[in-house]
Image (tube, rainbow, N blue to C red):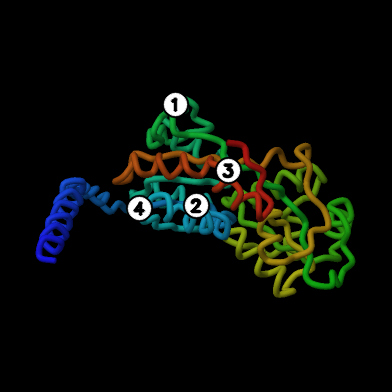
Amino acid sequence: MKKYLSLLLTLCLVLALTACGGAKEEPAKTEEPAVPAAEPVEITVFAAASLQESLNAAIEQYKAVAPEVTVVTTYDSSGTLLTQIKEGASCDLFLSAAPKQINALDGSLKDNAEKNPDGLDVVVQGSRLNLLENKVTLAVPEGNPKGIESFDQLADLLKNGEVALAIGNSDVPVGQYTQKIFTYYEIDETAVASKLTYGSNVKEVTTQVSEGAVDCGIIYGTDAFSAGLTVVDSATAEMCGQVIYPAAVLNVGEQPEAAQAFLDYLTTPDALACFKAVGFAPLA
């Protein structure tokens, strides 16, 4: 019996040692080097008022792409923004509702007194691009009380003093497109002045239509969409030309590289989807 127990203990010991010898040592885990967080960056963007809803949506998406970047926006008429830049405002990226305002800052055009009258050289060369296209439209308040159906009809009603129309100021791109429409229909703006009200940017014109303060207004299709207004007609290129929205990085800001990266993002399918959602046509 003692022999049997001794043999049994020896066998157990051999098995235990074999198991221990067969166990593989786990390699020591090494800590992955920590990726340093990107330095916070703030870029200043000046953008036409008509871009507000769609650009804000694109900026919200960009937070997931570049969380270290804060985009600070100023929305107003392109003419007002141009004036602020000329007066020394810091701006990294400018998105205008017409080429005219970018032209006035583009050093490649400084010898063209008509396009760049002050000979400014503010645009970072190689950054400028045509980003979007919009439409100039005739929008009416809810219910369309005057029964307006077209620009053709509007021209007749204006000449007869039978309609109240909201338009943009002459220094606002939408107002400049409206002046071209007036020229197309041979409408004398001074002769119909009593039937016109003005807005310092397209949002002000849109608000007048939304509130029913006028019978109709000439605004961008995207603003009509965002405000839930009915569009009864769209101007053709023959009437007012193409409505192009250019963008460019400027050399009067603090973060040109970050601004260029953000502009590059605005040309991606994800960002362009934000603009298409309100009616813009991508050009980039």
Tell whether label 4 touches label 1 (CB within 8 Å).
no
The residue labelled by disc 2 is 47
Label at residue 269: 3
Residue 70, picture quadrant: bottom left
Amino acid type of the residue tagged 2 in the rendering: Ala
Give how far apart the Cα atoms at labels 1 and 4 are: 30 Å
- In front of the other: label 1 or label 4? 4
Mark 2 near mark 1, Cβ–Cβ under 8 Å? no
Which numbered tag is attached to residue 69?
Answer: 4
In the displayed structure, would residue 79 be above or below residue 212? above
CA distance for labels 3 and 2? 20 Å
Position of the C terminus, as image quadrant, is top right
Q: CA distance from mark 4 to mark 3?
A: 20 Å
| Residue corresponding to mark 1 | 108
Q: Earlier in the sequence, mark 2 or mark 1?
A: 2
Instruction: Name the side, left or right, on which 217 lies relative to 52.
Output: right
